[in-house]
Image: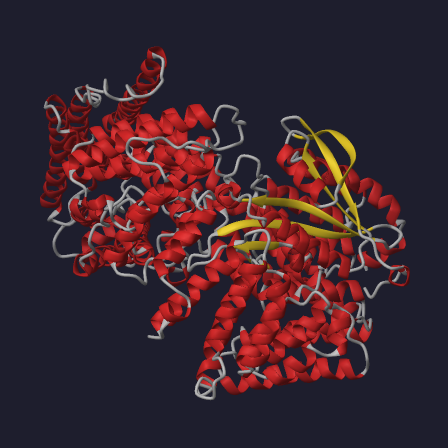
Amino acid sequence: MAQQQQQGMDSALFERRLRPVYDNLEVGNNRKALQESEKLLRKHPTLLCARALKGLSLLRLGRYDESHGCLQAVAEEKPTDDSTLQVLSFCYREMEQLDKIVELYQHAVKQNPGNEELLAHLFISHVRVEDYKAQQAVALQLYKAQPKNAYYFWSVISVVFQGIRGPESALPEKRKIYLGLAQRMVEKHIKEGKLETEQEAFLYLHILKLQNKYQEAWEFLTGELCAKLYPGAPVSMKFELLKELGNWRELNELLQQLLDADRDRWDYYKEYIQSSFELLKLSPKEEKNGEKDSLARCQEFLQGIIESSERKKRGPYLARLELHQRMRANKLPAEELIGDFDEMVIEYFNLFGDKSCCTHDIALFLPTISMKQRQALASKLLLESGVSSTSLPQNKEQMQKHLCALQISRMCGSHMELPTDHLIAFYTALKLHYEHGRSTFGKKLLATEMGPSDAYALLAANVMYDLSRREHKSDHLFEALCLLQYVLRNSTSNFHVKLLSLKIYHLFGCQVGAQEMYEYLDIKQIQLDSMGYVHCQLLPLGGRFSGTRTVYDATLKFFTNSYKERLEYIALTYRFCTFSKMEEFMNFKERLTNSLQYVACSVEAQICDLVSCYGNVTQNLSAYSAMSIEPAEDRIAWHELSDNRDLDAIIRWDPLHQVNAAEERKESFDQEVEVLQVRSLMLRLFASFIDLYHGTGVKDVPAGTETATLELLRESWTGLFQRLRLMNYKPLPQPFLVNLLPTRLHLLLELPYERFFDDLAQLVLDLHSGSGKLAEQCKRVGDNVIIVMDVCVKTIAECNEGNGKDGLWSRREQQQNVAASLEASYNDILSLYALLLSVLNDKLQVSSKTKTKKRTADNKENGPQPISEKERSQMVQELMRQLKHKLEACDAAIRTWKAPVLPRDLSSFMSDMSLKPEVEATLIGDVSATFKDSHELMVTELRNLLKDKIRMAAK
Amino acid sequence: MTSLREMQFDDLFKFNSLVFDALTEVYSLTFFVEHLLKFPGLSQIAVAPGPEGRRMGYIFGKENLTRTGDSQGHISALTVSAEYRRLGVATALMDYFYTDLALRGASCINLFMRCTNLVAYRLYCSLGYEHQRTVLDYYPEPENAFEMRKYIRRPMEVQAPTAIR
């Protein structure tokens, strides 16, 4: 009734009146938007859109209950006008209630059957919840209402998804039925001559391929229609089909043609060489008949390209090496046919050694030759570069060749076997080469360019790490850091230098330096996911909570934004009819949503907030409830967590036989997931403690089961630690500078985390029930506090002691790391403990004053008398007194914590460089100051934190 | 020595060695997603040989339809990693884009570049692009931009306004 009345009115008028509400919402002035909508509703109380906008304003203002009621009322009127529907679906999207949008449009469509716009909205609402079956039905209705090709293909793709992604896709016969149906649907359209676009042609090919109907796909792909609709079809599609069809001869010929036209395409060469090997398998007898076999023809073809090309391209040369490598792998006479491997590599080096990619190119072929041959080859290349220990490169090209040869020799493991003094001399030479290259070839460098000789310094830093590791002393690595910082002043845009510096700062536990490099790298947008690992995972160990929170905030903002936007992106795929990208995009979306980086950052940020709570009990509790942690509910999809780290961004030339990047990645990921398990469970367990006393959910639970969640979580907590010990994870080895840093897993296992929270859980339970063992449990928890404190104080003492001794930097380095982490983690424990005690105390004091009826009832039923609330309160207060005392002791220890002593003797450093003394002094001064600042900041922050906790415990 | 292929969403996780470059902008996710979803074939990535498939360079492009229904190509982003420069990667990517747009019946291709980026200017000129105009403060630093343009020639009969699409 209201709607009809509304439709009758002048819609333009309403639009004008609604405008101020929209405008205010747009600029984020939600309060004003609410006022405007209320004003409008006074005049037109039935105006649905205004009521929906009021709901949206309330939602934005955080008044969820009111908003919910308002929106519910509008939805019940079953609106059909576009603007109201849009506002409502916007609200539901924000609240992640996607199924409500479906209902909304279902009602609307029911009242306006055949309305194209509403149907399209209904379709997209099904897309959001990935209900492919419903999608198909709506798409067909749409096509009936408006026979547009797009709608027809929406239904086709919905059928395809039912076959490959939907709930029935696991059943092979169902899959077959759906894909067969999709194929027939497209074929019907083709027969009617209605296929129109490239994406439609793609979809047909895709459906055929999914059913392994390669011959039909081939015929369509090479047919007239496809040529007309899809002229830009990637030629790789043809390779793929020819391979599936086993038509190697045709593939071989096709690739020869393509390579003739484009002589630098690795993808073509790779397939070409493979097809040659397949042809050999098919007709091994050709040789006997006097004909050349396919490999000989392949070699001849490659040779022909090499000889006929005027401008030298890497393609055919690399292809020849690949052929050599594969022939050897197949025990075929490679040398006989192609020639000597070393000579070919040297030829390649002479032609392309002046390009910086030459190292990676040659490295491709090293794993298939023996270690001995590798090192011999490396020496040959060094000789070939024409730079010896007594000469310098004459030009940029020669320098690049020298660099390439040095990088290769590191990859071949030659550096690892050098004695220490040789390595030091080698480092000095690298430093010298860097400086020479910079001053000779790098003078007119643009701010956006990398220095031509920077790679010497990068190599030098790696060598110095090897030395530090070998000697267990950090002097070398510290010197490398200074060198890198020097390079960074000369070529400000070299991100490799920044990444390595960041790593070294983290190794030394210097958070200020690390943070500086992280900011300098300007990591943003999707990089926050793929590159965040270089910094974020290490932050909780640094003892600086405020800085840490800022980094997490930036990261989380990216994720929440893209999480919201993902729904709109999905709608886009349909709007653009980009069938070729839909699956890929859905997988991408899932990778983002389940990114370990995302989940870990959210959990750490929450812990960080709880640890740094500083207000009074009421403030802290409201901060806590705003975090809306649901202890009973595990929100993490553990099996879907995704590793999105880009480990290849950091350049490395480490010995190939000692690097197993894939294994390292897996091991580190597994451990990071376990760390997340511990942290998230700790958070939930802690939340269950608080909820038991101040929770909202507990009231709804039947009496006697209030503690069920807590007990369950406690069980999982001890179970988790038991499992982790059984798993016997090994700390990640750190053979090279560019390895992933060890995870926190072992730290978490070594610290008394498990016992502390387990005992705490018992304490909370005993306090709740008033158990007779309460006093005993208080003692246990108190003892735990003492243990934690003792270790903390001891670590600081050890750290200071190590500081005094000379040359023990590496030990100190570890200690500082450990100390920093202990600090952070212990404070974690103790801060959470302090927060809990203050909450308990608050509650108990209140309840001991106002004796409830329930308690007297309890007294009658239970045999043994529970300890009175007053006594309980006293016990908690005693624990708080003890905590306060211990926190003060800890504060005293931290006050005595000395800044790290840096290696004193750096006079040799840079003496070979053409550095002015004042430049040298400021450089080393700056780096040292960073360390000092970092320590002081950490001490200040920790002390501030302790001060807050002492205050908390004192109440 | 390059492999060219259509840019995939997963590449976005692995292109850091490219986007860490000082002149390469890391755009918002919306930018990348829109390009990939709307013009899937027009964004290409060059990949080096080897199991890790090191990323050498990429091009993000699109096809705009003018009010008269005329198709025009636009290159939104082009970058080549420092390690893989002077090997013809950029040329290969640009050639690919040109060929594809020619097949789609586009009349011209344009792009914007920093007016200080001489290396890029020389590259585009060598590929037949011409300076069309200078846009003041196009970049936030602020820096001016050159609009570069290249027309796609084709025989008269194909130039009919309704190309296949």
User: From what the image shows, is residue B94 above or below residue A428?
Assistant: below
The residue drawn where x is 29% and y is 26% is: A938
Residue nearer the viewer, A359 or A708: A359
Residue nearer the viewer, A593 or A799: A799
Q: Quadrant of the C terminus of chain A?
A: top left
- Across and down, in percent, residue A466 comes to 23, 40
- The quarter of the picture where residue A35 lies is top right
A710 lies left or right of A182: left
Residue nearer the viewer, B12 or A562: B12
The residue drawn where x is 29% and y is 46% is: A410
The residue drawn where x is 13% and y is 57% is: A863
- Across and down, in percent, residue A596 comes to 40, 52
- Across and down, in percent, residue A884 comes to 19, 27
- Across and down, in percent, residue B45 comes to 57, 54
User: From what the image shows, is residue A205 above or below residue B42?
Assistant: below
Q: Quadrant of the N terminus of chain A?
A: bottom right
As drawn, the residue found furthest toward the top would be A918
As drawn, the residue found furthest toward the front would be A290
User: From what the image shows, is residue A749 above or below residue B133?
Assistant: below
User: From what the image shows, is residue A284 above or below residue A277?
Assistant: below
Residue nearer the viewer, A805 or A104: A805
Report the coloring of the rendering. Answer: secondary structure
The residue drawn where x is 62% and y is 45% is: B78
A814 lies left or right of B37: left
- The quarter of the picture where residue A701 lies is bottom left
A183 lies left or right of A904: right
* Residue A510 visible in this rendered orientation of the protein: no
Tag count in the figure?
Answer: 0
* Residue A926 visible in this rendered orientation of the protein: yes
